Image: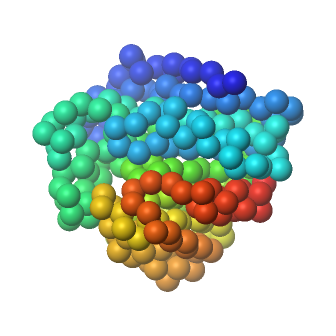
Amino acid sequence: MSAAFNLGDDNPFYLFGKFMPSELSTVEIPPQATHSYSIIWLHGLGADGHDFEGIVPELHLHAAPSIRFIFPNAPVQSVTINGGMKMRAWYDILDMTLERKVDSNGIYQSSALINALIEREVEKGIASENILLAGFSQGGVIALHAGLRYPHKLAGIIALSAYLPTLPQLEAERSTANHATPILMAHGIIDPVVAIESGKAAFQALKALEYPVEWHDYVMEHAVCQEEIAHISTFINTVF
């Protein structure tokens, strides 16, 4: 059974030129046994923390009883390409070309909020190397951006149907603690939202920087498929 926690969405603070929540509300699935691992899984644009809640039983994880699953809700903000409509978003999408005009400030501020979630788990006694970041689309961007810069070793990073617009800053900002952290990237070859070329470019750049990153692609659009779930399961069972 999952539980929803409000960690302060109604208490905004000013960061990177925006009023943002001081903490994120989350949907959580608590461990059924001794809490040894945590997975922080970020949804995509316009979705919420419930979006990937249903994937948990499909993963068939060996350590499942000892894992706390945390599905944070992105802040609600105006999204430029959607006519300024307000929705849950980890950062603004300024242009359909994705990488050409980037809301870097939004990416950095959301990453700071994810870092706070990681620290919350560490304060509960979970070593950072037993914490995994995962995300879909925008959520995958934040998982990669935050995870590669986090100052302490993480268990792994999963980026689904994602890209990495802050690659130019990575070489100067990356954390040596996570240079050997395993990364899984997966993408649909007919994705009309985030072109596979954008995801593959991020994969190739990370590989060039000698990160241990693996790539899988599938005949699907901007979605998740059963073959991909099997690859996610294998990846998590390897790192936990």
- Residue shown at 77% from the left, 49% from the top: 61
Q: Nearer the viewer, residue 192 or 176?
A: 192
Total labels: the figure holds 0
Quadrant containing the N terminus is top right
Q: Position of residue 142 (x, y in %)?
A: 44, 51
- Residue shown at 29% from the left, 47% from the top: 105
- Residue shown at 35% from the left, 34% from the top: 88
Say if 174 sits above or below 68 in the image.
below
Q: Is residue 157 visible?
A: no
Q: Nearer the viewer, residue 16 or 214?
A: 214
Q: Position of residue 16 (x, y in %)?
A: 29, 41
Q: Nearer the viewer, residue 145 or 58?
A: 58
Task: Looking at this view, name the residue that lies furthest to the top.
Answer: 10
Say if 52 sits above or below 3 in the image.
below
Q: Position of residue 180 (x, y in %)?
A: 66, 70
Left or right of 35 on screen, residue 143: left
